[in-house]
Amino acid sequence: MRSFIDFFVKYHVFFLFLLLEFFSLFLSVRKSSMKTGVVMSSANSVSGFFYKKISRYGNYFNLKEQNRKLVGENLALKKRLQPSFPAVNEGFRKGGDSLHNQYYYTSALVIKNSISYENNFITLDKGSMQGIEPDMVVISNEGIVGVVVNVSKHYSTAISLLNSQIGFSCKLAKNEYFGTVKWNGTDYRTADLYEIPNHVKLIKGDTVVTSSYSALFPEKIPVGTVLDFTTKGEDNFYNIRIKLAVDFKNLRYVYIIKNIFRKEQIELEKKSEQKKLVR
């Protein structure tokens, strides 16, 4: 809106001139029918120019609504094309005792984001009133973003992948070798992948995705691609740097995922661990 006002302020003299010019032409045309065709042609050209300008500004102000529609369309497309997430809804729903109803989506808008700290967080415009809970996953169309940590009625905050306090279970898409991705605390475009054995054949550009070993993320969500890798002495694992799939400096619309079987899985795993300790 500011740029729209500045446009008229900058050219106000020109608009005043046009107004006076049209008025004088109107008086002249009233006395001469021959001039009418010429004047109408000129008027159409001028009005066309302004309609084009107005249309451009109108399109600009409609971008937010257009983006929301695109997010809704993406949700529907994910339902058709993403076999890992067979149940895709705009908004969460209860129930489901089938693997086909394990994951549910809802869209959200990023209203605050940071990339320059060692531990970064993201604020979203959805909260408990929309069914958001801690430990739900946040992704974008490009890949993983983070995990919800705090929720109020109308908002939630997520710990970003750009946070040195959190790591994500991931794997190499081509051969299923798994490890942990953790941010290096410096460049928002890259992170480090740990625990990949050095006997595994790697090449630059290999795709890294989420693994099935996490109770948070669904499997095979993009994380990034291998940028470079090295080994140190007798170390049995690579030092791998990856380029992140998500551009965190241009993060606007995201999806929050609910895994309705998460608690069941965690409780079962805890029972198994306790039995090990007893023995």
Image (cartoon, rainbow, N blue to C red):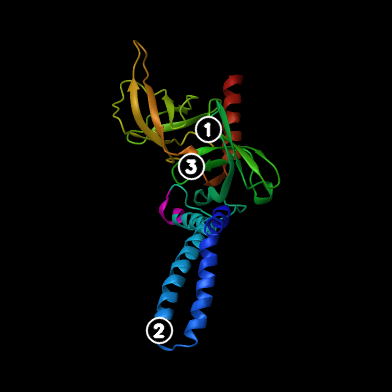
> Where are the magenta residues, as a range?
78-83
**Toward the viewer: 212 or 97?**
212
Q: Earlier in the sequence, mark 2 or mark 1?
A: 2
Rendered residue at 44%/71% (across/down): 46
| Residue 164 image position (x, y, % from top left) | 53, 25
Q: Main secondary structure of the magenta part?
A: helix
Residue at the spot of label 3 = 250
Along the line of sight, which residue is nearer the eye, 146 or 125?
125
Q: Which residue is mark 2?
A: 37
Q: Residues within 10 Å of mark 3 (few under 14, many from 20)?
A: few
The residue type indicated by label 1 comes to Ile
Q: Amino acid at mark 3?
A: Asn
Question: Residue lying furthest right in this view?
Answer: 153
Q: Residue furthest top?
A: 233
**Tag 2: residue type?**
Gly
Q: Quadrant of the C terminus?
A: top right
Coordinates of residue 76 in the picture (x, y in percent) = 48, 57
Mark earlier in primary sequence (1, 3) = 1
* Kind of element beneath mark 2: helix
